[in-house]
Amino acid sequence: MTNNLENITGQIDNEISSKFLNEIDKTKLQLIKGWFIERSSQLQPWKSFCNINKFSKPKNAGEVSKRLFTNIKIYQGNYIAVSAMLIIYCILTSPLLLFGLVMSFGGCYYISTRGQGKSIKLLGRDLTIAEQYGLVFLISLPLFFLASAGSTVFWIIGASAFIIILHASMLELKSVDNDLELQEVNIL
């Protein structure tokens, strides 16, 4: 599987840096790009991730905890991808949330690029950059409230946690490491 994120250079970097990013923003952008490249390199094959023949009920709590820690470490990139798919699903199935996000990002994009740091005149008053972003926030807030953005965020967190914990605890480990195995304790 080829990694297309490594090819993100050139014109994109030049266009972004020349328009509105300062050096700190460029550094943050490079860190984010590096994080995505690292996570995509950690993706395990989806065939092994979804292999239902390797699912089994754990014998005890020690095995559950060992499976959780090991499988989350091994399949971290896949779990991030599953969470991203849930986020995309929620955005696409809620038109008002999608509209609110487009309006918010569109307003911020307009202020940062088209406005070029200039104040705008609204109802006879000049608005500074901070006031413009505040206005975008005030317009977006009711849209997000009507779209139930808060409950959507908590649904995504809950659904992701449920799927990850269920999958990681049921998937058998690739190799058994006796050093990490937890022992059962019998209480008298």
Image (tube, helix red, strand yellow):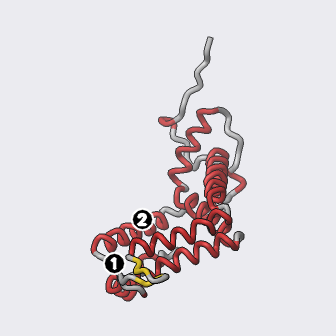
Alpha carbons under labels 1 and 2: distance apart: 19 Å
* Kind of residue sitting beneath label 1: Leu
161 left or right of 34?
A: right
* Kind of residue sitting beneath label 2: Trp
Residue nearest the observer in this picture, 17 or 58: 17
Figure disc tally: 2
Q: Residue at x 72, y 55 (%)?
A: 52
Q: Could you tell me if the residues under marks 1 and 2 are in contact, i.e. CB atoms within 8 Å? A: no
71 left or right of 94?
A: left
Q: Hey, which residue is sitting farthest top in the picture?
A: 188
Image position, residue 74 (x, y; %): 52, 53
Circle 1 residues within 10 Å: few <14, some 14–19, many ≥20: some
Residue nearest the observer in this picture, 173 or 31: 31
Circle 2 residues within 10 Å: few <14, some 14–19, many ≥20: few
Which is more N-terminal, label 2 or label 1? 1
11 left or right of 179?
A: left
Asked if 19 appears above or below 74 in the picture, the reply is below
Q: Secondary structure at mark 1?
A: loop
Residue nearest the observer in this picture, 13 or 115: 115
Q: Residue at x 71, y 41 (%)?
A: 57
Image position, residue 170 (x, y; %): 67, 46
Q: Residue at x 54, y 31 (%)?
A: 182
**Residue 47 can be seen in this image:** no
Image position, residue 61 (x, y; %): 62, 33
The residue where tag 2 is placed is 35
Asked if 19 appears above or below 70 in the picture, the reply is below
Q: Hey, which residue is sitting farthest front in the picture?
A: 124
The residue where tag 1 is placed is 21
Image position, residue 178 (x, y; %): 51, 36
